[in-house]
Image (cartoon, rainbow, N blue to C red):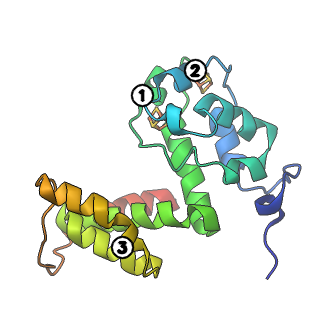
Amino acid sequence: MSQPAYKEKNIPIPASDPLTHIREMVQACIQCGTCTGSCPNAFAMDHTPRHLWRMVLMGQIGDIFRSRTFVLCSACYYCTLRCPRGLPLTEAMAALRQIAAKENIGMHRQSIQFYKSFMDSVRRYGRVREAEFMTHYFLSMKDPFLPIKFAPLGMKLMGRRKIRLQIPLKGEGGLDAIFRKVEEIEDM
Ligand code: SF4
Ligand code: SF4
């Protein structure tokens, strides 16, 4: 099956392009840079939030999905609270992540699986059970070398009692109803 062209290169935005909704969200951006200045993760992003919104408006789809900016957004809402135009920037970042997940874009797969495993744990227990969440993540990635890569960090965190080994529990689905309602609203 051939890949959508925007995964390979920049193309002019067609009428039904996946960014239509996101472009509407940031249409009123005046490029003031407040979002970038407020973002605690901007230092690690390859494109700043301000630049990303410019790229959205310019239709640089290939560059947007080759960027790691939206996967590094930690949804802290600083940019949204401070944007002088009141734009829903955190929501727009999440919408980009959703497109990357839906399109299964290879370079974002690891971040998206990590996020999914994290949210599954929250959905089941109402909090993150770290060891179990990481086990689910490793299994979902089907990469036998991945746990080895994370081992030094895991040992360090265990040494500092930040995480501990846990017996897997039968998930209680504590937040199931809330998650289902959100999914329902998002599908509307
Ligand atoms: S803070 Fe708002 S208006 Fe300013 S650059 Fe960011 S998105 Fe645009
Ligand atoms: S919500 Fe995301 S993009 Fe906005 S300031 Fe926080 S981390 Fe940065």
Q: Residue at image x 54%, y 44%?
A: 93
Residues packed near mark 3 inside 10 Å, few (<14), some (14 to 19) or many (20 plus): some
Ligand 2: does it lie within 8 Å of the C-beta at label 1?
Answer: yes
Residue highlighted by disc 2: 85
Residue under the image location 43 percent in, 30 percent down: 40
The mark closer to the camera, 2 or 3, is 3
Q: Secondary structure at mark 3?
A: helix
Tell me, for residue 147, which label it has, or none. Answer: 3
- Please name the residue that numbered disc 1 is placed on: 78
Where 96 sits versus 85, above or below?
below
Instruction: Provide residue 35's location: percent of width, then percent of height.
Output: 53, 25
Query: What's the residue type where badge 2 is placed?
Result: Arg
Query: Residue 187, image x and y in percent?
Result: 51, 62
Q: Which residue extends farthest right?
A: 12
Q: Nearer the viewer, residue 171 or 181?
A: 171
Q: Is mark 2 within 8 Å of ligand 1?
A: yes
Task: Specify which label sits upstream in the sequence, 1 or 3.
Answer: 1
